[in-house]
Image (tube, rainbow, N blue to C red):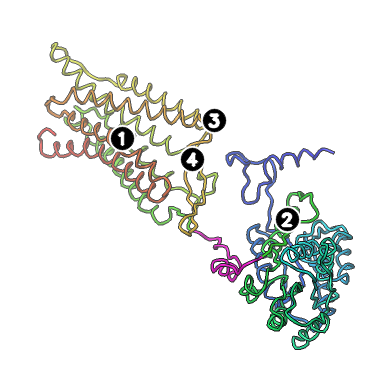
Amino acid sequence: SLPSPDRQICVADAFPVCPNTKAPSGRSESNCPCIDRKSIKIGGVLHGTTADTQWEILFAQARQAADDMGVELILDRFDNQESDEILFTKMSAQILALCNEGVDGLFVSIPSVNLVSAIEECQRLGISVMSINSGSDISKSINLEHHIGQLEFSAGLRAGLRLVDSGMKRGYCLNNDPENAENQDRCAGLKDSIRLSPGVIYGGEINVPLDNNDQLKVVEEFVAVGGNWDGISLLLCSPSLTDAALSLQERHPNVLLSVFDPTDPVKEVIGSRILFAVDRDFYLEGYLPVWLLATYAATGEKLATSFVETGPRFVEEAPSKAQQTCEANLYAVCDEYFELNQLTKVRPAGLALCAIVLLASIFFAGWVLSHRRTSVVRKSQPFFLVMICVGVFVAGATIIPMSIDDSIASIEGSSKACMSVPWCFSLGFTFVFVALYSKLKRINRVLAGAKRFQKLTVSVMDVCKPLLLLLTLNVIFLTVWTIFDPMHYERFRLCGSGDLSSVGVCVVGDSSVSVAMLSSIVVINFLSILLANWEAWKARNVATEYSESKYIGILMLVFLELMLLGIPVIFLANENPTASYLLKAVIVFVFCVSILSLIFIPKMVSKDSGSPP
């Protein structure tokens, strides 16, 4: 049957994980409720006790998977028990306790059929159960979700075939735990490999006692052959048999040795005294069950295959120092915390620059209004001057949204702040530019009229025409940009030189629309600056009293240099948010302060001294 409409929506939106509520694009809200993985509880019951050091990696990776997936993991490790029966009884009790408590998924190792009744009870409760490491046949018989591990019969078979290729003529399987189904499968696999190899004899399965002092004697009595043991091979089901096997090798130098599940001391003699070892990936056996169960609990999706094989992996030489270090550290993962490169430390500096600009704009606007009847202000037209102050105020306020990132706002809030930056700066620039351009135009028109003995003035309407034209174009481009492909805030993780870090940046957009709109805004404003620079050049020799053509010309050059030098440098520093923020804040500050200083300070000095600026 087809999946439900709700499920189809969640599949299309990739099952967002809380706190993320976005669709895969990262821009729009997902119609699928986010999954709160913190509420998912996974349980584990394994027979690897605290005395089994080879299980350290498996337990460590199970916990790592829980951290990576953000789920709760209940995985207690048993101490070494007096007997297997006691261990299996405790495992059964723990399985029942977890299932009655209400876990969302359970993974177990099954070294004995004694655990089956407890596992079946969990299945009756509707809990998803999978097995790892041991018990593949039992897992299949009771229809568990998956078995993650090494198929022991296959591993024994492949190990036997390798021994045949190495010269084995008679093979024996050394088993220190005859009741263990895992060991039984390994010996059966060796036997089958010999059956497939003409001329090779299967000597049998040797049940070796746990006491190391008796192991040597038992094996020699079973083999019942003297000499160098040419062509005789011993496949050890456990690394605990290695010491006895190496002692046998000292007496019978030509015996071929191989071993399952090598420990670190055993790995040191692989390739020299031991032909090869049969290893498995404990990393995967620990990590995968938690990952799979958490994914199934969250999405209902699972693998189609019943068996996920993690071995055999044949080790033919001692591991490198780098490999030994990784294993000793249990394949440790870098801490989840990494450098976020947020603006927390540099934000006060940027906001301080912003405050200076805003207060200065208000101050100069107030000065213009309070001295509007004086000659120096009237000749510069107060309307123009206040308009400049308004434009500088809006442009300077650009630093405020620039100061917002995910350290003080949500991703959505940071995205809105990103889009506010071009709005503030473009509109502020438009007001400032039109006022300055109109003043230059006035100077040149007055000069031209004087040559023709005409008296000309520049009215408010003369300012409004270029203002409306430039403002309309900027607003159109910004509106299209905002509606169809707005800027948004994204955080990217960077990895380099062994250190993990991430950067949060404003991304222009996801399509060519944003690039086209940004390019259009830059082009029309750049052309406007070039036009204003031409007007400033024409007015370069004007020396009329109270004329600010010289200062406006300097400002036009400052604007041009900021665009030509500032924009490329900003792009180069974009991967360093703190440096990029300070650079952009300084550019905005220089832009605004240059305008206020060159337009108003000469007028204030002129008013006090009575001389022209």
Mark pair 3, 4: CA separation = 14 Å
Circle 1 sits on which residue? 564
Horizontal arrangement in the rendering, residue 387 relative to residue 28 (left or right): left
Q: Which residues are magenta?
A: 315-338
Circle 3 sits on which residue? 484
Q: Position of residue 464 (x, y in %)?
A: 34, 22
Above-or-below relation of 564 to 471: below
Q: Amino acid at mark 1?
A: Leu
Q: Amino acid at mark 4?
A: Val
> Quarter of the image containing the N terminus?
top right
Q: Position of residue 100 (x, y in %)?
A: 83, 66
Mark in front: 3 vs 4 = 4
Q: Amino acid at mark 3?
A: Phe
**Residue at image location 22% in from the left, 35% down from the top:** 599
Horizontal arrangement in the rendering, residue 158 relative to residue 29 (left or right): right
- The circle drawn on residue 292 is 2
Circle 4 sits on which residue? 507
Mark in front: 3 vs 2 = 2
Sequence-wise first label, 1 or 4: 4
Within 10 Å of disc 2 (Cα), the crowding (few <14, some 14-19, many 20+) is: some
Name the foreground residue: 355 vs 207.
207
